[in-house]
Image: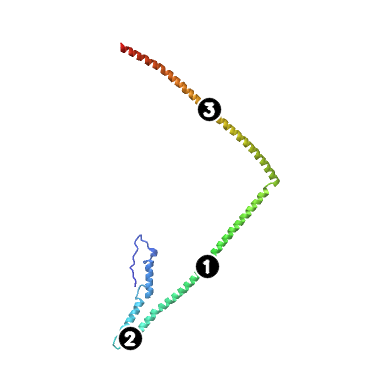
Amino acid sequence: MLTKGRRVAGRGEDMSAHYAFGPHEDDAIIKHRLLTRITTTRGEPPLKKLQKKFMSFATEVEKDADNTSDCERLYKAFLQEINTFELPLLKSKAVVDANLREKESFNELQVEIQRQILQAQTDIEDLKKQLEQSKIERQHKEECEAIRKLISSQPPRSETEKLISNLEKEIANLEAESAACTRTLELRKKQFALLLHVVEELQISIEDEQRNIADELRAATEEPKLSIEEGSGGASDAMAVD
């Protein structure tokens, strides 16, 4: 028999669903109890009791003494224990069979539900396509109605052609004016370029004239200095001779 000491969860520890064992430990305990026919955690296991009855009967049979009555008594007790042990097995088998039938029914129901889900999904997709098609058709109808109203609001064709003719004449006049303006603009560009050239030449001549005047002033300023220096040089020579 599988046993495990219970551990009390301390403060702050997680008590998952308030169980003393984990899910895997519970599965192992349940499996062991089913195999050994233990329905509670107390008392002697039925399989162990059956084993004891069999060992008592076998031990009594192996004796050489005249113990037929004891062997018969132990044999009956062994058979009674077998019947007692077999009854829960039959019940368990009936439960297993019922569970298998229920599982099969559940699987069939699941398959049917899955089929209905797929069918519903298919129907939904079809309805979506129909809805999109209906939206497109409605949009086309609204566009056609808008075009019809627009056409109805427009003037007759004769008036439109007359208006187009007048507009074409205005366009021709505007093109002629644009061409004249273009020619005038080109002429103004040429005149402005010529004027810029004249201004540049005038500026160059003014700069040359200013440069010449500056040179003349510089030369006029330097001549007295040279004469003074020459005079002072002659006087120095005369003093040296004396």
Instruction: Report how far apart the C-alphas of labels 3 and 1 lie in the structure.
Output: 97 Å
Position of residue 237 measured from the top left corner of the image (x, y, whole percent): 33, 13
Check the image and name the residue furthest to the top: 242
Instruction: Report how far apart the C-alphas of labels 1 and 2 lie in the structure.
Output: 64 Å
Q: Is residue 50 left or right of residue 161?
A: left
Q: How many marks?
A: 3
Q: Which mark, residue 199?
A: 3
Indicate the secondary structure of the residue bearing disc 1. Answer: helix
Q: Are marks 1 and 2 in contact (CB under 8 Å)?
A: no
**Quarter assignment of residue 121:** bottom right
Q: Residue at x 57, y 32 (%)?
A: 190
Q: Which mark, residue 84?
A: none
Q: Residue at x 55, y 64 (%)?
A: 122
* Marks 2, 3: nearer the viewer: 3
* Marks 3, 1: nearer the viewer: 3
Indicate the secondary structure of the residue bearing disc 2. Answer: helix
Q: Which residue is mark 2?
A: 71
Check the image and name the residue furthest to the right: 158
Amino acid marked by disc 2 = Cys
Disc 1 crowd rating (10 Å Cα; few below 14, some 14-19, many 20+) is few
Position of residue 95 measured from the top left corner of the image (x, y, whole percent): 44, 75
Residue 175 in sight:
yes
Amino acid marked by disc 1 = Arg
Q: Who comes first in sequence, dot 3 or dot 1?
A: 1
Q: Which mark, residue 115?
A: 1
Which corner quadrant holds the N terminus? Answer: bottom left
